[in-house]
Image (tube, coloured by chain):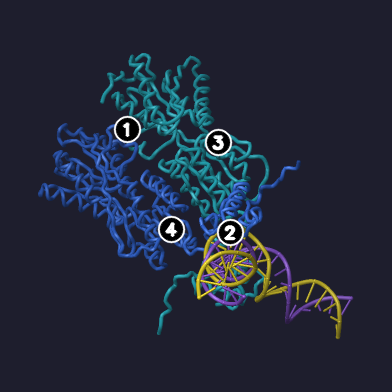
Chain colours: A blue, B cyan, C purple, D yellow
DNA sequence: GCTAACCGATAAATCGATTTTTCGTTCTTG
DNA sequence: CAAGAACGAAAAATCGATTTATCGGTTAGC
């Protein structure tokens, strides 16, 4: 008996219809759960679907609706644990609702961010989860606004008058870091950050500074902010410490406001032969898996990725379904993990400084 | 004067056509570069496009073709640097060719892997870049084969009789690691791996073992393989070292065949108070940004992410364009970065052992 | 007994492009 | 000058689903 060859073309709804002896419209109704179909016909449709292995073509299915079942996600990068987890979470949540997530990396470029957004608009995505490169006032958000797109802003945002925002409560976390460092006895602390992300950095910095000054009015807080990229920060930091060779003028702790800053700080400590926490304490915003296995383990602020993702999707789908009302700014609490990289200053004398190759 | 409201609906090709006073077919031709259009009409079309801000709807555009301009990417996870970089690279390459990348995470589950693949088949993707959870013989590859899908397998694969494969030359890299450790004087080495990914792990293990035995026939190589998950490995490793409290029986170096293994090894060293490289040396397969800033810096095998991505896309698009011929298995060379975590054994006596909380 | 409401299902329109077919014109050419 | 090739553009078919309009056949109501 001749086996039928070429299962090349996938069965369409019309193939199912003719197999079941009904019209395509009926098949569509059965599959979308409309109840006005005679049970017998419904069963024949289901049988034909089973037999042919029919599956709805999401592309064709989406053609007729204004909003397609696609969610766009734009992250500044994919390489870090934080955004990796975020994309993973968002993908799962979109999938749960029968949507497809299309993720793109803006590679820390606002230009690219806007281009990607335009492309997502071409796809007529139902909504967008945007983690802006800088903040909520960039050209990307403006584009979304101008084109009536539905979206949520996450991570490097505080609040917006056009879109809902969801982010970590970095001010509260920073306050907690300040308290912890002060309790340990630190009275001279260096804060390292990236000026680019104005609002978020300000929140983290102010959260830290306000609480610190409140607890110890004459505490000394130095700030090294790098406007543009990460690389210049390395030099700024090197300069900063070079001018403070004398132990007395040197801060006893460093609080980095972002992950790369933590790495840069660590690498500068290495170069100088300083060990945490004996020579200097270190806390970083953003946790990573390796931080708890290295020696010393690095203290870090853990962002609630899961909660941010869940809330962002929740509010996004509500907007997609047409919910009105003013945009809401949501802050999710962080956890602060104090690990071995933080100790009391002066408990052990600074090991001799001097640059080291 | 009444501003026209509601730029809600985006202009379609018909809007452009009527503005330019031509038919939709002509607009399509102009935009796709067909030259049989009167220059004057072409200009009017372009003007109308400009005026209305028209952009082709990729979904509608793809409707008519059998293969859509979508590439699917399936990774075991998004959280690690390696797969994060991979997705980022793939996205850029797809974009360059006017394709949209839809990425999904199989979360280390073969079940999910197959479901995702089925969904991508529903989308009628032009091709798939699949980084299988286990190896090239899983159900996902079988599904692709059975449904005549176009695809490339990457990372945890060696060679396949149905699909092209691109992966890191882990055997060669492992051989290099073996040479380096032996040159340093190591004669008792522990290799840590995940048995799940049979082929790849075997390649890495054999590459290491063969070279080591060739150079030093009586070298001692212990192997701790964990079949299933990462967590059990922690216990296996703890057991392994507990049975070898006596310094003489203890390996002087550990080679981890995958990233999580490196983390587990480090954390076990911590627990025991061992320092690299004085108490034990460590090399891990897979590099990460933090490895060069911690103290000691961790020696690692760097996978050529960029090359793997570029080659995978290259060969994938050739297949999409209909190129025939037998599948090719491509191996890209790795770089081995020997850092401070590797030293000569016995140069400094083992610091007293004993468990440590 | 005749019209109205109703049920279930089909035909047709629609989404927004692309591609094939058809149809006037104009230009060659014998 | 008539037949045919060449050209450019419009009309129509197509992709695969969803949704609206339509239609035949019952059943109910007055």
Q: Are marks 4 and 1 on the same chain?
A: yes
Secondary structure of the residue carrying tag 1 is loop
Q: Are marks 2 and 4 in contact (CB under 8 Å)?
A: no
| Residue B200 drawn at (x, y percent) | 52, 31
Q: Along the polypeptide, which appears first: circle 2 or circle 1?
A: 2
Give the labeled residue for mark 2.
A26
Kindly identify which numbered label has been placed on residue A293.
1
Chain letter, disc 2 residue: A
Q: Marks 3 and 2, Cα distance to the nearest angstrom?
A: 38 Å
Give the labeled residue for mark 4.
A112
Secondary structure of the residue carrying tag 4 is helix
Kindly identify which numbered label has been placed on residue B173.
none
Kindly identify which numbered label has been placed on residue B138.
3
Q: Marks 2 and 4, Cα distance to the nearest angstrom?
A: 45 Å
For the residue pair A278 and A104, the one nearer the viewer reads as A104
Q: Marks 4 and 1, Cα distance to the nearest angstrom?
A: 36 Å
Q: Marks 3 and 4, Cα distance to the nearest angstrom?
A: 37 Å
- Image quadrant occupied by the C terminus of chain B: top left
| Residue A185 drawn at (x, y percent) | 13, 39
**Which residue occupies 50% across, 29% down?**
B201
Is residue A234 visible in the rendered image? The answer is: no
Chain letter, disc 1 residue: A
| Residue B336 drawn at (x, y percent) | 45, 33
Could you classify mark 4 by the number of other residues whose Cα lies within 10 Å: few (under 14), some (14-19), or many (20 or more)? some
Could you classify mark 2 by the number of other residues whose Cα lies within 10 Å: few (under 14), some (14-19), or many (20 or more)? many
Q: Nearer the viewer, mark 2 or mark 4?
A: 2
Q: Nearer the viewer, mark 2 or mark 1?
A: 2
Q: Are marks 2 and 1 on the same chain?
A: yes
Q: Is residue B215 left or right of residue A178?
A: right
């Amino acid at each position: 008996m001749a086996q039928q060859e070429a299962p090349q073309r996938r069965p369409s709804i019309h193939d199912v219809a003719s197999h079941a002896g009904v019209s395509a419209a009926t098949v569509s109704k059965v599959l979308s759960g409309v109840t006005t179909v005679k049970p017998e016909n419904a069963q024949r449709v289901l049988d034909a679907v089973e037999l042919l292995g029919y599956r709805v073509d999401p592309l064709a299915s989406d053609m007729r609706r204004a909003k397609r079942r696609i969610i766009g996600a734009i992250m500044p990068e994919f390489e870090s644990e934080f955004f990796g987890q975020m994309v993973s979470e968002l993908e799962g949540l979109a999938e749960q609702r029968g949507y497809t997530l299309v993720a793109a990396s803006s590679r820390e470029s606002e230009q690219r961010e806007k281009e990607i957004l335009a492309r997502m608009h071409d796809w007529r995505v139902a909504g967008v989860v945007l983690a802006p490169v800088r903040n909520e006032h960039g050209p990307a958000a403006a584009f979304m606004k101008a084109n009536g797109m539905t979206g949520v802003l996450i991570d490097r945002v505080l609040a917006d008058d056009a879109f809902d925002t969801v982010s970590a409560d970095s001010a509260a976390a920073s306050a907690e870091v300040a308290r912890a460092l002060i309790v340990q006895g630190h009275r001279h602390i260096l804060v390292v950050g990236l000026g680019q992300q104005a609002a978020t950095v300000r929140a983290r910095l102010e959260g830290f500074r306000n609480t610190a000054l409140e607890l110890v009015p004459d505490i000394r807080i130095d700030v090294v902010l790098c406007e543009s990229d990460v690389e210049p920060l390395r030099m700024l930091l090197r300069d900063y410490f070079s001018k403070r060779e004398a132990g007395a003028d040197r801060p006893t702790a460093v609080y980095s406001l972002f992950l790369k800053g933590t790495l840069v700080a660590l690498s500068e400590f290495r170069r100088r032969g300083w060990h945490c926490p004996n020579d200097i304490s270190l806390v970083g915003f953003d946790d990573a898996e390796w931080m708890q296995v290295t020696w010393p383990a690095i203290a870090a602020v853990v962002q609630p990725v899961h909660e941010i993702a869940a809330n962002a999707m929740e509010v996004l789908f509500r907007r997609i379904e047409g919910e009105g009302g003013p945009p809401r700014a949501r802050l999710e609490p962080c956890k602060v993990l104090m690990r071995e990289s933080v100790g009391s200053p002066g408990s052990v004398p600074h090991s001799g400084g001097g640059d080291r190759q």
